[in-house]
Structures are given as C-alpha cells and as structure tokens.
Image: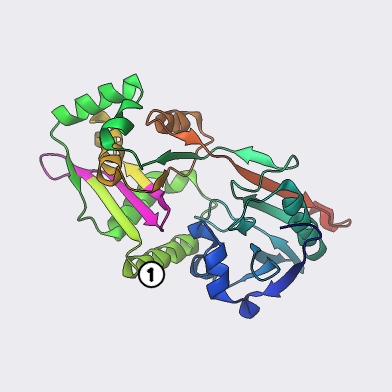
Amino acid sequence: MHAPYHIHFLHRKELDTEKWDACAHLIYGQSYYLDHMTEGQWDALVMGDYEAVMPLTWKKKWSVRYLYQPEFTQQLGIFSKDPIPSQLTEAFLKELGRHYKFAEIFLNYLNKHPDLRPFTNFILHLNAPYHKLERQYKGKLKYSLTKARHASLQYAADIAPVTVHSLYIQLYGRRMPHVKAKAYSRFQTLCHFLQEKGQLLVRGVRDHRQQLLATALLLRDKNRLYLMQSAVTAEGRKEQAGHFLLDRLIHEFAGQPLILDFEGSEEPGIAFFYKNFGSEDQPYYFLRRNELGWPWRLFKQ
C-alpha cells in the first residue's frame, strides 16, 4: 500500500460482502455482525479493491448524521490484510471527515495514531501447551484455583445461551443503563445466528449441588475466542468460580492457534483479574471528532 490512497465511500447495499469479510480480520467487522448490531444501518470506506476497509456505523439525530459505536462491538476502524501505517490511518480519518462531522468510535488495535486515545484490551495466546500457559499465572490466581478445586466445582458445556444472557443482565444490567433492551435483543439474535454457524461457545461452572455459579459466552472465528459476556454469582465469587471457569477454558483450548480475547478492561479490578492469567495488553483506540458548526457543536456535549 503506497500513497496516494484511493479511498471511496460506499453504501451498505453497494458492498461486495465476500471481499469485505475476507478483509475484516476481527469478528466485529464482519458484514453479518454489523448487519445484526446496526440493523443494516452502516456504510463504508473502501480502498482500492478491498485492500483496506472501514465500516461507518451511523445514527441520525436532529437531521445530523453521526458515527457511533454499536453495543457489543468493542473495536471497528480500519481493517486490512496488510500492516496499517499511520499515514493510511490518517488518510481514512481524513476521508471520514468529509462525510461525517461528528464521531465517537473505537478503532482496532492495528490503527495506532498519535491523535487517538488508547484503551486497554487483554489477550492471551493459546498456542502453547496448558502446562506452559499455567506457568504464567500469577501467585494469587494459583491460590484461588487451589481453593476452587477443593470446592469440587464442575466445568460445564451444556448451558443454554439464554441462561447466560439472563444472568448477565440480572447481575450487571444496572451498571450499563446505556445498553437498552433492543441492543440485548439484537445481540441475542446474532448469537443464535452464530450458533447455527458453529461460532458460539457457552461454558459455565456448577457446584456439587448443580447450582450454577459462573457463566461465559464466547464468539469464535478462525483466530480468536471473544469473551463477550461473563457472569459470576455472589456464591460463585466465594468459591472462586470465575477463576476456575477461565482456567478450564484455557485448558480446553490450549495448544490451538487461537487468541483468547478478554475484551478489556479500563476498570482496575477487572484488568488485574485478566493480567493474572499471563495476558498482555493489545490496546485499541478511541476517536472523538466534533467539527459541527454552531449551534450543532452543542450536539452531544
């Protein structure tokens, strides 16, 4: 890829979805994912013959079209099969500015640029044997796992997706008032679609009384397992069920050419929890742009 970059704007209906999906290297950027989470309301920037692409997920308010980040879609931005130099990121952002004057979006980990704010995302490469992955665990995690094993916890794969959705909303829904019922419904429909494709994983932990203590819902593509929803009950926290669940998940997929994507987090406690598994930070980036004229500049202040 060499400048000048030939980037053009396309409406959703004009896209070649086969070429698009071959270019988008994260599940969030796949056309079916975007169609489900935006109800088909997205356009795109495309360079050349789909050498690099960028989805534009938009809404409209007070006659102003603006870019936003759909729920359950951690990072979008520019996708390419080749490395993305900062000059290419800049070219895409410049072209984006010609079509949208307001944007609050998250770009993926390959879109590093000095004008973009980094956000934390922990990943763990699973291609080593379990005994080598376990060696990377931090001391306190090892203690928690010893306690969990003494509690005779059971790792389970027979849990319905709706059970995970319900427990997640029940335990954490109030912390995320911005996520509306419609967004949860769209995500559940997406999960059903991916289950049919063999790309949905649901795992959980039960105690000796068969009481459900922890759950995890993951999406899968050829490169990654994405931890989309995880929940631990009050009883589960006492028994270290969350630690046990992730450890068993790592054990299940150890030695495979996959990345376990923990999906965050900026919250210190959660970040500490994920770091204990020997994970590394692979930051993604936030773009906020407001080039609206007055009085529209007050929009979303």
Q: Position of residue 103 (x, y in %)?
A: 72, 55
Q: Position of residue 221 (x, y in %)?
A: 41, 58
Query: Is residue 55 found left or right of 156 in the rendered image?
Result: right
Query: Is residue 258 found left or right of 255 in the rendered image?
Result: right
The three-letter code of the residue at mark 1 reads Phe
The residue at the far top in this view is: 139
Q: Residue at x 74, y 58 (%)?
A: 92
Look at the numbered disc 1 and give the secondary structure of its residue. helix
Q: Position of residue 245 (x, y in %)?
A: 27, 40
Q: Which residue is mark 1?
A: 193
Q: Quadrant of residue 135?
A: top left
Q: Which quadrant of the figure contains the N terminus?
A: bottom right
Query: Is residue 122 found left or right of 276 in the rendered image?
Result: right
Mark 1 Cα-neighbour bin, 10 Å: few <14, some 14–19, many ≥20: some
In this picture, is 6 found above or below 267? Answer: below
The residue at the far front in this view is: 2
Q: Residue at x 57, y 40 (%)?
A: 283
Q: Quadrant of residue 210?
A: top left
Q: Residue at x 36, y 42 (%)?
A: 126
* The one of 69 and 298 positioned closer to us in this rendering: 69
Would residue 212 be seen by someone viewing this image from the given angle? no
Q: Residue at x 65, y 79 (%)?
A: 14
In this picture, is 14 found above or below 224? Answer: below
Q: Main secondary structure of the magenta part?
A: strand
Q: Is residue 218 magenta?
A: yes
- Counting the numbered discs, the total is 1
The residue at the far left in this view is: 209
* The one of 167 and 90 positioned closer to us in this rendering: 90
In this picture, is 267 found above or below 253? Answer: above
Query: Is residue 154 found left or right of 274 in the rendered image?
Result: left
Q: Which residues are magenta?
A: 205-229
